[in-house]
Image: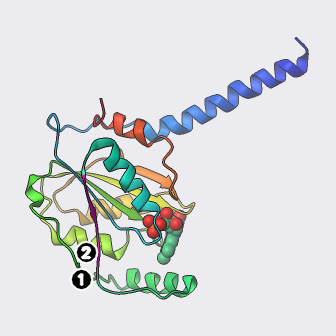
Amino acid sequence: MSKWWLFLVVLVVVAGGVGYRLLWAQTKGEVLMVKENPKILVAYYSYSGNTKKVALEISKNVGGDLFEIKTEGEYPQDYSAMVQQAKKEIANGYRPKLLNKVENMAQYDVIFIGSPNWWGTITPQVSSFLAAYDLDGKTVVPFVTHGGGGKQNTIDDLKAQCKGCNVSDNAWVGYGKITVGLRSWLEGLGLIK
Ligand SMILES: Cc1cc2nc3c(=O)[nH]c(=O)nc-3n(C[C@H](O)[C@H](O)[C@H](O)COP(=O)(O)O)c2cc1C
């Protein structure tokens, strides 16, 4: 084998190893301590569709009920104006009024809660959702989508606002609408056998 072939083989093995580790990093983590066949809710807020896509994939794979968090208030058409409005809302601790409600929250054993990363934290809509329900003792699994900043303070802020919840450390943190590794993540949580 010429040294170029050897170089190529080493390159493929190293690149494969790095790729595997990236996926593994997303999927390793805590298995949920919940009963067999838990009742699952997948609640999410999505402004431009990425978090919605992840929510749909989660519910498709684990069979949970989907709930889109809807609130009063609108955002400007212009993207940079929208981003500035969101910045102010977050700085002011704005909690928009919820327009829909989960019926019988008590029936759920596992609640996935999804938010886009906005200015390093969860959106005001998700904060309103967390404040509206008694989630004491519930197993909560966060999922966050971002535009390159990763989770930043999203998971910690969600934990702080989810009073009395058992928030899993095995959260989904994905770039945009990418769902590569999502099924293995759900397997890692113990929700797909
Ligand atoms: C108001 C606003 C603020 C954002 N702030 C961040 C940020 O701080 N860090 C980051 O990585 N992405 C940020 N993003 C990008 C979104 O998190 C990303 O595009 C996300 O996947 C959008 O989800 P959605 O399509 O469900 O709304 C921001 C987007 C918006 C609209």
In the image, the segment drawn in magenta is 65-71
Counting other residues with Cα less than 10 Å from the Cα at mark 1, is it few (<14), some (14-19), or many (20 or more)? some
Q: Is residue 1 left or right of residue 26?
A: right
Closer to us: 123 or 121? 123
- Ligand 1 closer than 8 Å to label 1 CB: no
Q: Mark 2 vs mark 1: which is more N-terminal?
A: 1
* Position above or below: 44 against 168: below
Can residue 20 be seen from the camera position used here? yes
Image coordinates of residue 66 in percent, x first then y, are 27, 58
Image coordinates of residue 28 in percent, x first then y, are 41, 35
Image coordinates of residue 2 in percent, x first then y, are 91, 14
Closer to us: 64 or 31? 64
Image coordinates of residue 143 in percent, x first then y, are 37, 55
Q: Is residue 68 magenta?
A: yes
Identify residue type, mark 2.
Ser
Taking the spot 24% from the left edge, 70% from the top edge, the residue there is: 129
Q: Which mark is residue 141?
A: none
Q: Is residue 49 left or right of residue 95?
A: right
Dot 1 falls on a residue whose secondary structure is loop
Q: Quadrant of the N terminus?
A: top right
Closer to us: 51 or 158? 51
Q: Which mark is residue 97?
A: 1
Identify residue type, mark 1.
Lys
Q: CA distance from mark 2 to mark 1?
A: 7 Å
**Residue designated by label 2:** 128
Dot 2 falls on a residue whose secondary structure is helix
Taking the spot 29% from the left edge, 70% from the top edge, the residue there is: 69
Query: In this figure, what is the number of numbered marks?
Result: 2
Q: Is residue 26 magenta?
A: no
